[in-house]
Image (cartoon, rainbow, N blue to C red):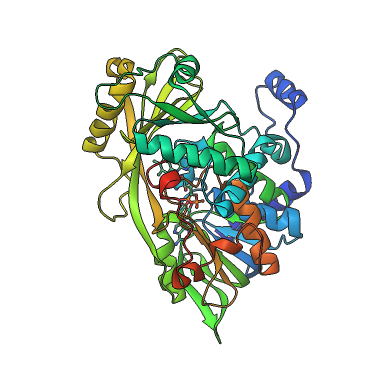
Amino acid sequence: MAQKDAKVQDLSQESVMFMKRYSAFAVAREAARYHSGWERAWRSPMPKKSYDVIIVGAGGHGLATAYYLGKNHGITNVAVIEKGWLGGGNTGRNTTIIRSNYLQDPSAAIFEKARSLYETMSQDLNYNVMFSPRGVMMLAQTQSEIRGYLRTAQANALQGVKTEFITPARVKELCPIIELSGPRYPVLGALWQERGGTARHDAVAWGYARACSDMGMDIIQQCEVTGVDQADGQVTGVKTTKGDIACKKLGVVVAGHSGVLADMAGFRLPVESIALQALVSEPIKPCMDVVIMANTVHGYLSQSDKGEMVIGGGTDGFNNYTQRGSFHHAEETVRALVETFPMLSRLKMLRQWGGIVDMTGDRSPILSSTPLGGCFINCGWGTGGFKSIPGSGWGMAELMAKGSSPLTDAFGLNRFAEGRFIDESVAAGVAH
Ligand SMILES: Cc1cc2nc3c(=O)[nH]c(=O)nc-3n(C[C@H](O)[C@H](O)[C@H](O)COP(=O)(O)OP(=O)(O)OC[C@H]3O[C@@H](n4cnc5c(N)ncnc54)[C@H](O)[C@@H]3O)c2cc1C
């Protein structure tokens, strides 16, 4: 075993020094030699005894936090600890919608920062995350939704976020497969964000992981954090299934398991954990090149590059930690969407799944210091945190490095005690 570990360490050192850039030339070279020369994208080292910073959770938010700690603040003595495999939580389970059309100013700031970072992420990380700004529309199917989205469009104009309210005719032009005169809820217009879209979720996690590993950070998979060590009100390290590891600062970035980690650290969070589900159809020819969210009937839809219709539904009606789908949700979601997309009734559904999302009362995230000194929390992204990964990582890294960040200041835990909520129930209560 010791010999095997030594080999892993050696490989890791080699990779730090010789991580090669991906390029068109490299693809051609590897094609010519049967792809025998690709190196591992990231190292898998054993943990060291101590780090300056430990991040718990190798989802998109944890990895992005680590990446910007290194890139923006020069902090690279960092470990990202993951109990399963990296990107195996909600980051690898979501429906990949990216948009920034939120109502409140602090939300627009962090989501628009994230959306703009997605535009150049493939170049920044030297990893193709397949960002596809194909446009996102949120259908207005009731009078109150029209009012809500007109208000959001006005707010976005003031925030410098480019959105517009479009007519049913324009909706049909952008998405010919839609049925405007649905039996229960006709389409009355939509909030349209032209530069919203999708990205490949796994690639976002993999790209950040590779870049972190390249900076010398350790990504430690199959290692569960089971306790948080502290002395005199300060965090001193974590207990894990691979032994105790000391740290000066701790970032807890575990989405649906935030309450569990907070309990280990000795504080409570105003967060509920609930399963959110999605499903995909069999692949079909390209028929839809926008993302559509129908929040009244409770479903949303896009077409993947493989041709599958990617369909998202709602959360379970009760708190739970079961990462799986259920038949009644698939049935409910498809039944609702068929009214607006009758063509769906002809498709076979291929697979479904669930992820545990972390919901706050005001439907806004928490990026904050905590009652435990040196321990920071990033959670509460609920049903819509894929889109925010780079902005969240940017802000969280600044918060951990400097003690505050203009991107995260409004999202502190203290807002719940002070009644200073950031109400995004229209933008994020159901939607993604
Ligand atoms: C079905 C579904 C659809 C969604 N659709 C969208 C969408 O279209 N657009 C959008 O923006 N968002 C969407 N989301 C939300 C989005 O996926 C999440 O907000 C986001 O991925 C959260 O990322 P994260 O890094 O915080 O969490 P995760 O990716 O869940 O990462 C947390 C990690 O922490 C690890 N962990 C937990 N406990 C421990 C421990 N004790 N020790 C070590 N590691 C631990 C977990 O294994 C996990 O890998 C969707 C979510 C789901 C479930």
Which quarter of the figure has residue 405? bottom right
Q: Is residue 168 visible?
A: yes
Which quarter of the figure has residue 128? top right
| Furthest-left residue in this view | 328
Residue 332 appears left or right of 198: left
- 105 shown above or below 292: below
Q: Is residue 3 visible?
A: no
Q: Which part of the image, by quadrant, shows the N terminus?
A: bottom right
Q: Which part of the image, by quadrant, shows the C terminus?
A: top left
Task: Point out residue 344 in the picture as x, y percentages from the top left corner.
Answer: 32, 19
Residue 320 appears left or right of 411: left
**Residue at the location (57% across, 62% down)?**
410
Task: Point out residue 189 in the picture as x, y percentages from the top left corner.
Answer: 43, 26
Task: Point out residue 183 in the picture as x, y percentages from the top left corner.
Answer: 25, 22
Instruction: Count up the numbered dots.
Output: 0
**Residue at the location (42% across, 68% down)?**
269
